[in-house]
Amino acid sequence: MLASRQCTSSRNACVYNRTHALPGLSMPARRRQLTACVVAEAAASGGKVIAMYTKPGCELCEGTRDRVQGIIDRAQFMPSAIAEWRLEERDITTNPAWAVYEMEVPVLVASGSDGREVRLPRWPPRMTTDKLRQHIEASLPQ
């Protein structure tokens, strides 16, 4: 079931959806709708991007994507430096310039509103989600 109020380019529509519980929707549907609104706002405002370089068949990449997206989604509802960032996935097989990351994926790169890219330091795969969030937040450019 889709929400009766769809996200528009107007920031007020998204704020309205966040402050009202979107009655009639299940909790997962509400989360998807609210996340879609937040992502639409970030894209419209030319927001900050965390790019994840990945390749097909990379299981570590899939797990990392899910964890980082979960961290960003959770940050929308609590004070966090990562709340204004969005995740963008980049397949290294689609651009020859990205082939440099072939043996290192997944690689996270933060691109601020100034367009400058900063590679985030590598993290242990067994790091907890909370520790990963702290690691990412500490590494993000100001």
Image (cartoon, helix red, strand yellow):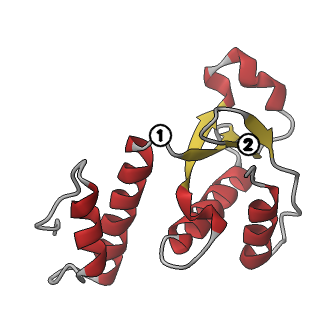
Question: Which of labels 2 and 1 is toward the front?
Answer: 1
Mark 2 in CB contact with mark 1 (< 8 angstroms) = no
- Which amino acid does the dot numbered 2 rest on? Val
Q: Which residue is mark 2?
A: 109
58, above or below 69, in the image: above
Circle 1 Cα neighbour tier, 10 Å, few/some/many (<14 / 14–19 / ≥20): few
Where is residue 55? Give x, y as percent.
Answer: 68, 37
Horizontal side of 112 relative to 43 (left or right) equals right
Q: Residue furthest top?
A: 96
Q: Secondary structure at mark 1?
A: loop
SS assignment at label 2: strand
Residue found at x 81% / y 56%: 139
Q: Disc 2 and disc 1: Cα gap in Å?
A: 16 Å
Residue 46 - label: 1
Amino acid carrying label 1: it is Gly
Q: Which residue is at the front of the view, 91 or 81?
A: 81
Q: Which mark is residue 11?
A: none
Where residue 34 sits: x, y (%)? 34, 68
Please name whichever residue, 73 or 83, is drawn nearer the observer in this view of the structure. Answer: 83
Q: Quadrant of residue 80?
A: bottom right
For image coordinates 49% across by 70% down, the residue present is: 76
| Residue 81 placement (x, y as % from top left) | 65, 65
Q: Quadrant of the N terminus?
A: bottom left
Label 2: few (<14), some (14–19) or many (≥20) C-alpha neighbours in 10 Å: many
Displayed quadrant of residue 96: top right
Q: Is residue 52 above or below residue 65?
A: above
| Comes first in the chain, label 2 or label 1 | 1
